[in-house]
Image (tube, rainbow, N blue to C red):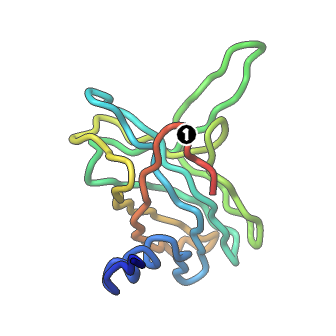
Amino acid sequence: MIFRPPAAAVFAALLVAAPVAHGEVRITDAWVRATVAQQKATGAFMKITSTVDARLVEVRATVAGEAEIHEMSMDGDRMKMRAIPALALPAGKNVELKPGGHHIMLLNLSARIEENSTTPLTLVVETATGERETINIDAPARALGKQGH
């Protein structure tokens, strides 16, 4: 017997996997790390490409009390993580938000993020001319150790 998922399920899966392009900005490979019970923070990751010089200036998530743009760096043998006010998106350059580097922190989670669910995120990008673009994406959740693309 051959299993054929309903057309709606196939369409939904394609929507989640498809790159999101708005105006000058393209988002690909977005995902959120799934959480375990009682975990109150997690990370969101993606690749962002802008056709013009811009900055990621704000992130919102309904599942999080706060969403921050973070950078991670090494200070000797210590890993340091801190919030930054914005992340540069140079024209034509692929900027990757990934574990161990720049990423989005979702803090004060109101619910557990289950593997294979999706998390709605809103990104606000500001161009060098001051124009703002709001981008809504649904990032699939992946368990720790299943971050491969």
- Please, which residue is most extreme toward the bottom here? 7
What's the residue at 32%, 45% (across, down)?
Answer: 113
Q: Position of residue 90 (x, y in %)?
A: 73, 64
In depth, the one of 15 and 56 nearer the eye is: 15
The residue wearing badge 1 is 70
Q: Secondary structure at mark 1?
A: strand
Q: Position of residue 148 (x, y in %)?
A: 63, 51
Left or right of 52, for residue 19: left
Q: Is residue 136 above or below residue 79?
A: below
Q: Say which quarter of the image contains residue 35.
A: top left
Q: Is residue 41 above or below residue 55?
A: above
Left or right of 119, for residue 125: right
Viewport quadrant of the C terminus: bottom right
What's the residue at 42%, 68% (across, down)?
Answer: 137
In depth, the one of 142 and 128 nearer the eye is: 142
Q: Is residue 121 above or below residue 36?
A: below
What's the residue at 67%, 69% (across, down)?
Answer: 49
- Residue type at mark 1: give it: His
Q: Position of residue 77 (x, y in %)?
A: 75, 13
Q: Say which quarter of the image contains residue 13.
A: bottom left
What's the residue at 39%, 76% (across, down)?
Answer: 3
Q: Position of residue 109 (x, y in %)?
A: 28, 39
